[in-house]
Amino acid sequence: MKEIKISIIGFGSIGKGLVREIIEKRDFLLRKGYDLKVVAIADKNSSEIDINGLDLANVLKKEEYSYNKTALDIIYEVKQDIMVECTPSNIIDGNPGLSHILAALNSRINVVTSNKGPFVVAYDKIIESADKNNVSIGYEATVGGAIPIINLIKSNIRADKILSIKGILNGTCNYILTRMQKEMLDYEEALFEAKELGIAETDESYDVKGIDTASKLVILANSLMKMNVKYTDVKVEGITRITREALELAEEIDCTIKLIGEVNKEERLLRVAPRLVPFNHPLSVGGTLNVIMLNTDIAGEITITGRGAGPKETSSAILSDIINIADERL
Amino acid sequence: MKVKMKLELKDEPGTLIKALLPISKYGGNIVYVVHDREKKLPNGNITVQISIEANKDQVREIKNALEDEDIGILSIDEVKLIEDLAFIMIGHIVDTDIKDTIDRVDNTGFAEVIDLNLKMPNIKKESSARIIIRATGKEEMKKCVDLINKIANEKDFVLIYPLMLETQNERD
Ligand SMILES: NC(=O)c1ccc[n+]([C@@H]2O[C@H](COP(=O)([O-])OP(=O)(O)OC[C@H]3O[C@@H](n4cnc5c(N)ncnc54)[C@H](OP(=O)(O)O)[C@@H]3O)[C@@H](O)[C@H]2O)c1
């Protein structure tokens, strides 16, 4: 039996969703030989700590936590194998996530994260710190939610060079465009519906302006294609000006409109833009689905689709990173 | 020699015959004709592939005769003579002088707007257009796309290009 002690820094929808999955999967994981213990959780101002493992069902019920220790206090003081970082994404300076991740790595704690910000601003620095300290960092959850794109490329198509990646990387935009086309809604109407259903955030701009898609492209380009690019290298156009009439015009020629993120190594091209996609093309997936199409030198085209966001789906990626690290390091 | 031609025809009765006549007239021997009415070009026309046996002079004469009949030759032996691109544009298309937009493409000499489909919901809102551009080859189409990008930048249009810019002649 492997004991895995983790802390969860950032206890919002992802952090709590992860705890729910850990509770749900406890017996399954024990049978496989993994004893997952959450020794600390922290939100912005407070925390809950138990070095022998928290009573998770109880933690979920609480509205206030017992301690005022900060994320950094927990990283420095609580003995743990893996720090799971789930604070809000900030692509300007990466913080607070970046400082948490670097502190953990430099304290020889492995890291798993769903937070895009640190990887968009400091990919190289993070990887260097992990290597230098001989610990691992898992970031599958930063791109494509439940779609195992990063681990797929890192552990399966290992002899291939990735020439280009194209895809739908934001479920909110995909939902809005799908509804506009299917129900002949205006952009504002579809956005309103997405908010009502909790698919879009209260502040939707990150998604609909293409910023989220562009951030994910930067992570893919740097980590899977060794392109060494920054957010400002991406040409970004969102979906805010797409009209219902444009979707009608597209439909008349058997196409739909999708917000596509595209990176091409040879052309050094990074672009997020609405594009005409034929209905019968593999990238033409609807609703909140995400889809990623790789083009590699040996395998050619590979397309993978799945749920791109949501606490449960993202937990799938986080848990698999945790187990990979347990196998490798613990 | 054997030559493969891809022609563009209107989806109307009698157009195929019109395309085949010049071939026999100039002594070409038709090997096969593939007529796919399902696969339409963005402008609604259909394509037909014809393989013929003919010598160089005959091919030249056939080509001229087809052009006189106004039949579009998309390619001869896989060499494309025509590139089509269908894309969508959103913005204040009419107010920003739609004629100027079209003229600038047409005035290149190597590209022209062959179809424009405009939808205007109401005066305040932005309108949307589907435009088909025809250019005389791949390089020319690239230049034309650069020009369209420039115009869009000046007039603040959103451009929605096909996922694959190259595969526009046939939407397959
Ligand atoms: N939601 C998704 O479907 C999804 C999918 C993939 C990836 N992600 C990424 O996962 C991360 C978390 O997303 P989320 O939806 O869970 O966000 P969220 O609901 O806003 O939760 C963020 C959490 O981080 C805490 N936090 C903020 N600053 C902190 C600090 N300095 N120290 C410790 N905790 C701090 C917040 O605490 P307070 O409540 O006290 O402010 C809150 O508990 C984001 O980076 C997001 O981009 C989300």
Image (cartoon, rainbow, N blue to C red):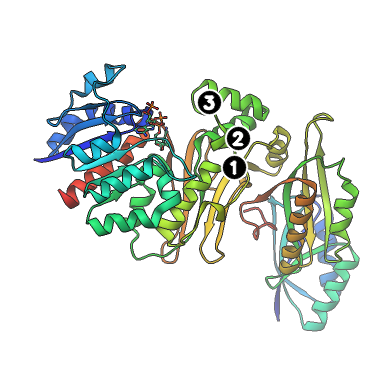
Rendering coords of residue A222 (x, y %) = 43, 57
Residue A87 is drawn in which quadrant? top left
Rendering coords of residue B95 (x, y %) = 87, 40
Q: How far apart are the two marked residues, 2 and 3, measured between alpha carbons?
A: 18 Å
Say whether marks 1 and 2 touch (CB < 8 Å): yes
Quick one: SS at disc 1? strand
- For this rendering, which residue is in front, B132 or A4? A4
Q: Quadrant for ligand 1? A: top left
Q: Is residue A158 left or right of residue A5?
A: right
Instruction: Give the chain letter at badge 2.
Output: A
Q: How far apart are the two marked residues, 1 and 3, measured between alpha carbons?
A: 22 Å
> Which residue is found at the position 71% from the left and 36% from the top?
A248
- For this rendering, which residue is in front, A279 or B5? A279
Crowding at mark 1 (Cα within 10 Å: few <14, some 14-19, many 20+): many
- For this rendering, which residue is in front, A20 or A97? A97
- Callout in the foreground (2, 3): 3
- Residue ID for mark 2: A177
- Residue ID for mark 3: A202
- Residue ID for mark 1: A258
Instruction: Give the chain letter at badge 3.
Output: A
> Which residue is found at the position 53% from the left and 47% from the top?
A214
Crowding at mark 3 (Cα within 10 Å: few <14, some 14-19, many 20+): few
Residue B125 is drawn in which quadrant? top right
Q: Is residue A192 left or right of residue B71?
A: left
Q: Is residue A73 left or right of residue A174?
A: left
Type of amino acid at the residue the image marks with label 1: Lys
> Which residue is found at the position 80% from the left and 30% from the top?
B121
**Mark 3 sits near ligand 1, with its Cβ under 8 Å away:** no
Quick one: SS at disc 2? helix
Rendering coords of residue A144 (x, y %) = 43, 43
The lab-note entry on whether marks 1 and 3 share a chain reads: yes
The answer to whether residue A302 is seen in the rendering is no
